[in-house]
Amino acid sequence: PRDPTSQHTTHEPPAMDANWGVGVGVDLNAPPPTGEDWRAQLLPEARSRVVNKIMECLKKHLPVSVPEGLNELQIIAVRFEDKIYTAATSQSDYLRKVSLKMLSMETNT
């Protein structure tokens, strides 16, 4: 535990690289709110950015040539993100699971 009278604060690295922007609007160093789900602290814009990153990854590995195909990829990305969002136990668990799934997509091609 940190001495509250100390002027020294530790800075943890961001949960993701700057392109994800997931930590925007969320104090990653704040203690978890008591009695409140971590999901309440995650802004909808952050989830949208994660869905967009998933879309980029899917488009690289599943090229589509028609607009309907892009709509299908969007549906897949949203469902994928929502499944992980629902199953995750914390914001860091959520980001870790998304990252690992995307990494496995990258390495399986």
Image: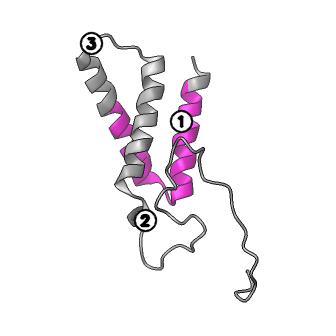
Which residue matches tag 1? 101
* Label disc, if present, on residue 68 of the rendered structure: none
Q: Circle 2 sits in a helix, a strand or a loop, which is it?
A: helix
In the picture, measured across the screen, residue 41 lies left or right of residue 104, that is: left
Residue name at image x 50 percent, y 48 percent? 21
Q: Name the residue under label 3.
A: 66
Cβ atoms under marks 3 and 1 closer than 8 Å? no
Q: In the figure, is residue 18 to the left or right of 24?
A: right
Of residues 73 and 26, the one nearer the viewer is 26
The Cα–Cα distance between marks 2 and 1, rounded to whole angstroms, is 23 Å
Question: Which residue position is annotated with label 2?
Answer: 41
Secondary structure mainly formed by the magenta segment: helix
* Magenta span: 76-105
Give amino acid for label 2: Gln
Task: Please tell me which residue lies in front, 15 or 99.
Answer: 15
Identify which amino acid the numbered label 1 is placed on.
Answer: Lys
| Residue depicted at 35% across the width and 54% down the height | 44
Residue 95: x %, y % from top left: 53, 49
- Image spot of residue 84 (x, y percent): 44, 47
Label 3 sits on a secondary structure element that is: loop
